[in-house]
Image (cartoon, rainbow, N blue to C red):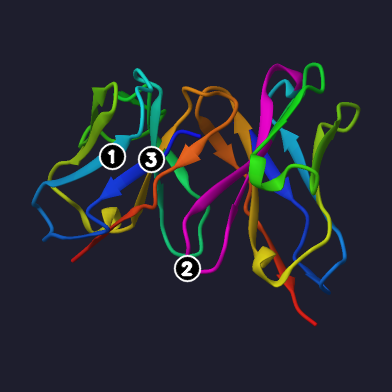
Amino acid sequence: EIVVTQFPATLSVSPGETATLSCGASQSVRNNVAWYQQKPGQAPRLLIYGASTRATGIPARFSGSGSGTEFTLTISSLQSEDFAVYYCQQYDDWPALTFGGGTKVEI
Amino acid sequence: QAQLVQSGGEVKKPGASVKVACKASGYIFNIYGISWVRQAPGQGLEWMGWISAYNGDTRYAQKFQGRVTVTTDTSTSTAYMELRSLRFDDTATYYCTRAGDALDYWGQGTPVTVSS
């Protein structure tokens, strides 16, 4: 099983700042990585797939990068609605998927 | 716009089974697969299994092999996830998701509580 690790577990930032979230895979997953946002009491929402492609309706302040085993989600000019938990997921072993443990972005 | 609507919450005793339904609309059901993901209270996301709505092929996470079955009814565009031999640590919210490459549409979640 491909293990996905996210860090940091918690990221404290202020509105207007940039948040950088990291994700690592235990083996190369090429660019088969997605990022999700989850707010309390809600289902996760797809933000990024293919490591860097924004899903439909996702604002341009969300950007993804990386390939192989290291990936980054960058949220520029953080807005109040961006404070949430973010999950990284690999799908190189599709349809089997594994998620990282999540990064909580808080004020 | 695709939509996945799940059945309501369940309370079960240890050892029982639960079957969660997921009705899809707004897209051609048998073009995509359905993956099931669960989330224990305060914890992260855990993939359980996948089914092709096209031909019924399935794949399960090793952790759930032998205890979970996912099926589809293409006549009603509905997917099902049955989990057997429930334990206290199966208490979680269970989500169905539309599975292309990534999981682009999610159901609202079905809370399942295992309690004696």
Assign a secondary structure to mark 1: strand
Instruction: Indicate the amino acid at tag 2.
Output: Gly
Which comes before the other along the chain, label 1 or label 3? 3
Q: Nearer the viewer, mark 2 or mark 3?
A: 3
Q: Quadrant of the N terminus of chain B?
A: top right
* Rendered image: mark on residue A23: 1
Q: On what subunit does the disc labeled 3 rest?
A: A
Q: Where is A97 relative to A92, above or below?
A: below
Q: Residue B42 has which mark?
A: 2
The reply to whether callout 1 and callout 3 are in contact (CB within 8 Å) is yes
B8 displayed left or right of B100: right
Labels 1 and 3 share a subunit: yes
Residue closest to the far right: B75
- In magenta, the rendered stretch is B30-49
Q: Amino acid at mark 3?
A: Val
SS for dot 2: loop
Disc 3 residue crowd, few under 14, some 14–19, many 20+, Cα 10 Å: many
Q: Have a look at marks 2 and 1 and say if they share a chain.
A: no
**Subunit ID for the residue under disc 1:** A
